[in-house]
Image: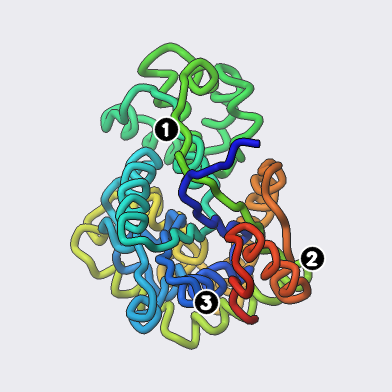
Amino acid sequence: MRCDRRPRAIALMGPTASGKSAYALALAQRLGGEVVSVDSALVYRGLDIGAAKPTAQERAAVPHHLLDLRDPWQPYSAAEFAQDARAAIAGILARGRLPVLAGGTGLYFRALLDGLAEMPPADPQVRAALAAEAAERGWAALHAQLARVDPQAAARIHATDAQRIQRALEVYRLSGRPISAWQRDTCTTRLPLRVLKLVLAPDRREDLHARIAARFDAMLAAGFLDEVRRLRALPALAAHPRPLELPALRAVGYRQAWEHLDGASSPAEFRARALAATRQLAKRQYTWLRGELDARWFDPQRQADALAQAVAGFLGRAGAAPAT
């Protein structure tokens, strides 16, 4: 049998608040690895507490990549992420270290591991026109429009996923072809690594919901609302006509906090809305994760030993996984 000599990497996937970041840190510390963030919120400067960004101490303990790449008003695409992540991984491998890919953004994982289809580049004018239509009619109406021109894409894009609806309609308006046709007909380049895909997810959904609530309350205690006040005071955001249409501020928690500071909700309503949005995000992440047929699922609390054995078996080392 032919031996697979490709470099190895470990991908830690999972819903929000499942413990991916903590496990990635422990794994990288034990194995001499470096963490590559696969999270669309962590690329933005100033989104720290609410995005659960690794602390300065954690970054000092283990190198982390793909953090703080853009200001919140600056665009950053999945294609740019894939390019930056592949460059970071090449550097990690050149240093003889193990890449640990950790996050919950499915589009970023697909772009990195499987490659993206070639299609028309972003067009600021078309995007602005779509954003204006959404402001007037709502993203649900634009999703219905997408369903008419590209039912295949609309079936897999949630009606509240503004960023993906906008991109799909942008591609159609620029090229006259559905984005699903571009994706189907274009060859992509897979990441040339041997990757162990691990999904960290509690077996019981109520356990995840409890973790989500506890983490959000800890964020509030750590000054999350003050963080959002600082973002609101940034001149580029203060002057933006529709700041909540920016991808950075569509991150769960930030939109609800921004609206709360506008006086749209009481403290209790704000907390309830933020938790509901986070649970909805987790639900969408579970849907994506169930499509990762080559991934192995573990409850990190209840199956710690089995998780450790999976890592050790992949790396061919005894005791290769962190104690939990």
Disc 2 or 1, which lies upstream in sequence?
1
In this rendering, position of residue 138 left or right of residue 285: left
- Which residue is pictured at 41% across the width and 23% down the height? 171
List the single residue furthest toward the right.
204
The kind of secondary structure element at disc 2 is loop
Q: Quadrant of the C terminus?
A: bottom right
- Which residue is pictured at 63% across the width and 63% down the height? 311
- Which residue is pictured at 37% across the width and 38% down the height? 79
Camera-nearest label, 3 or 1? 3
Three-letter amino acid code of the residue under disc 3: Ala
Q: Is residue 187 above or below residue 189?
A: above
List the single residue furthest toward the bottom.
221
Disc 2 or 3, which lies upstream in sequence?
3
User: What's the distance in space between the residues labelled 2 and 3, CA to CA?
Assistant: 22 Å
User: Do residues under tags 3 and 1 come within 8 Å of each other at their CB atoms?
Assistant: no
- The residue to which callout 1 is attached is 133
In percent of width and height, residue 107 lies at: 50, 43
Camera-nearest label, 2 or 3? 3
Q: Is residue 211 above or below residue 177?
A: below
Q: Is residue 115 above or below residue 19?
A: above
- Which residue is pictured at 75% across the width and 68% down the height? 306
Q: Which mark is residue 26?
A: 3
Does residue 226 show up? no
Quarter of the view holding residue 267: bottom right
In percent of width and height, residue 1 lies at: 66, 36
User: Do residues under tags 2 and 3 come within 8 Å of each other at their CB atoms?
Assistant: no
